[in-house]
Image (cartoon, rainbow, N blue to C red):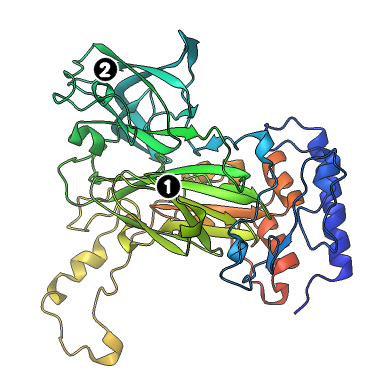
């Protein structure tokens, strides 16, 4: 069915021009900067002829490659083609512009000073309060006031010096996970160095000769379970080809924190709180990208015990690397779900060719919830009504094992108690610009190890990221208008507070 009628095409084009003029008057980050003329070249909607290089501009990018379109869901024709499912389709950013900056939503970057030929960082190991969800502040451990710690981002060939201060009440060391460095710098407590005692500092210094997705973490197991980890990203000297427009990092962790506690039980074999970059869904910040961009997502599982099958909706992604190094292109694998094990990193790349709001999440059902507790009596959830539990006491056990009448077993399937979505909670959830214009009910379905990928045409991207007060549902409905079937669209009911 051909939905891209001529008027629609015109609408998209004028929308893009409006977006471009808006962009021209706004300060943008280096990654998002576009000159108006370029923004008006086809980054959204169908085009009939590819842009032609005049030799003075940056290398043009096409939208069609061997049957794969960067602007609409499509199956490439030939699995052996370089462009099958967007495999080697480049982003809009050229390699000459250098690597796209690494962005780990909800986390800061660790600043450095150049000193004696090295990038010098300072890491402070300390206890940290982290708001997993609005109103749910947990006492965890991390670095520099953050859990996970701030991101270290360098370039292959750099020399780094990292001064670690220990403000914890017990000894620590820091391990630079994945680096091939001199053994004295490895941070393995008692094996390669003495513990950094409370109140003391220690200096690590080494050359970085490799590139890739790395991380640092305490080398005390129970401190790891308390959250002591951070990204250590090394951009390659030679920018990866094909270049990406976006480079995101998502760090997955689990904790076991009882309903009446704020401190994790690091001995636990079970885990009921799940965070991405230190926040639980729906408080995780969505990844917002422009339609047609090439996106990389680096994912690290730093859960104590749990592996995560990671699933992206609406797109087929390529597994382009694991924690060891970038995989040769011939071995890249197309995936919908990828299992990422404890202490493993994985790199996903794809063309954002399908506009909409898409889930990106661990597929383990118990990881798609928050603060799960068994409802064992009236004491667990403050203020919750336990009448149903009390009246049900004499009915279980035993249960009728015959399960007639449509499996009418009391209490099954085991219902999830909803989050207490108070007005304050909902205000905090909606406070991020990245969620503007989504359906009013979206927070109900995003729990635990879940975040969102929003793929937006240029003008809608500008509305979300550069303007305020976009009405709930407006962006989603516009995407349905342009790319979906508006005649069957059901508006979301307005969320009732208190759920
Ligand atoms: Cu999981």
Q: Considering depth in this image, is 197 or 372 the residue closer to the camera?
A: 197
Q: Which residue is mark 1?
A: 299
Question: Which residue is the extreme one toward the top?
Answer: 116
Query: Can you give x and y, in whole percent of width and height, for residue 10 in the image?
Result: 88, 61
Residue 211: image quadrant is top left
Label number found at residue 98: none
**Within 10 angstroms of label 2, few (less than 14), some, or many (20 or more) residues?**
many
Query: Can you give x and y, in whole percent of width and height, for residue 313 in the image?
Result: 52, 63
Q: Is residue 384 above or below residue 120?
A: below
Q: Is residue 200 left or right of residue 90?
A: left
Q: Is residue 263 above or below residue 5?
A: above
- Give the SS element for disc 2: strand
Query: In this orientation, does residue 229 appear?
Result: no
**Within 10 angstroms of label 1, few (less than 14), some, or many (20 or more) residues?**
many
Q: Is residue 119 above or below residue 116?
A: below
- Which tag, 2 or 1, sits closer to the chain's start? 2
- Give the SS element for disc 1: strand
Whether label 1 lies within 8 Å of ligand 1 gets the answer no
Q: Which residue is mark 2?
A: 166
Q: Is residue 77 above or below residue 259?
A: below
Q: Measuring 86% from the left and 48% from the top, which residue is drawn there?
A: 17
Query: Can you give x and y, in whole percent of width and height, for residue 305 in the image?
Result: 23, 49
Query: In this orientation, does residue 43 appear?
Result: yes
Q: Quadrant of the C terminus?
A: bottom left
Which quadrant contains ligand 1?
A: bottom left
Which numbered disc, 2 or 1, marks the residue closer to the eye? 1
């Amino acid at each position: 069915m051909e939905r891209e009628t001529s008027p629609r095409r015109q609408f998209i084009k004028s929308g893009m021009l409006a977006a471009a003029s808006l962009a021209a008057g706004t300060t943008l980050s280096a990654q998002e900067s576009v000159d108006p003329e370029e923004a008006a070249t086809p980054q959204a909607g169908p085009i009939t002829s590819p842009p032609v290089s005049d030799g003075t501009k940056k290398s043009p990018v096409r939208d069609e490659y061997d049957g794969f379109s960067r602007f609409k869901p499509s199956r490439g024709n030939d699995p052996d083609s370089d462009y099958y499912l967007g495999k080697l389709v480049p982003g809009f950013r050229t390699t000459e512009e250098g690597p796209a900056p690494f962005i780990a939503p909800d986390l800061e970057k660790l600043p450095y000073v150049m000193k004696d030929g090295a990038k010098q960082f300072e890491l402070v190991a300390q206890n940290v309060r982290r708001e997993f969800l609005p109103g749910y502040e947990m006492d965890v451990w991390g670095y520099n006031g953050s859990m996970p710690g701030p991101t270290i981002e360098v370039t292959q060939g750099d020399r780094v010096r990292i001064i670690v201060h220990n403000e914890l009440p017990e000894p620590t060391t820091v391990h630079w996970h994945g680096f091939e460095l001199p053994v004295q710098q490895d941070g393995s407590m008692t094996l390669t160095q003495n513990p950094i005692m409370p109140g003391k500092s220690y200096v690590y210094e080494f050359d970085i000769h490799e590139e890739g997705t790395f991380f640092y973490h305490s080398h005390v197991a129970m401190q790891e379970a308390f959250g002591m980890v951070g990204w250590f990203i090394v951009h390659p000297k030679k920018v990866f080809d094909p270049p990406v427009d976006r480079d995101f990092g998502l760090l997955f962790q689990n904790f076991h924190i009882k309903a009446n506690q704020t401190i994790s039980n690091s001995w636990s074999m079970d885990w009921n709180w799940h965070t991405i970059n230190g926040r639980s869904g729906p408080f995780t910040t969505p990844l917002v990208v422009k339609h047609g961009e090439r996106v990389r997502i680096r994912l690290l599982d730093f859960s104590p015990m749990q592996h995560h099958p990671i699933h992206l909706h609406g797109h087929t992604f390529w597994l382009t690397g694991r924690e060891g190094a970038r995989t040769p292109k011939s071995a890249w694998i197309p995936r919908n779900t990828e299992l990422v094990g404890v202490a493993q990193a994985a790199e996903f790349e794809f063309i954002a060719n399908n506009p909409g709001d898409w889930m990106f999440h661990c597929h383990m059902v118990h990881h798609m919830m928050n603060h799960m507790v068994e409802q064992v009596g009236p004491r667990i959830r403050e203020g919750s009504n336990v009448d149903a539990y009390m009246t049900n006491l004499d009915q279980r056990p035993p249960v009728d094992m015959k399960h007639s009448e449509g499996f009418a077993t009391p209490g099954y399937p085991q219902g999830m108690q909803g989050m207490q979505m108070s007005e304050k909670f909902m205000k905090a959830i909606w406070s991020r610009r990245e969620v503007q214009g989504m359906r009013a009910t979206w927070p109900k379905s995003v729990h635990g190890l879940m975040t969102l990928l929003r793929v937006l045409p240029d003008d809608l991207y500008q509305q979300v990221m550069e303007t305020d007060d976009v009405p709930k549902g407006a962006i989603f409905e516009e995407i349905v208008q342009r790319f979906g079937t508006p005649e069957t669209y059901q508006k979301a009911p307005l969320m009732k507070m208190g759920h």
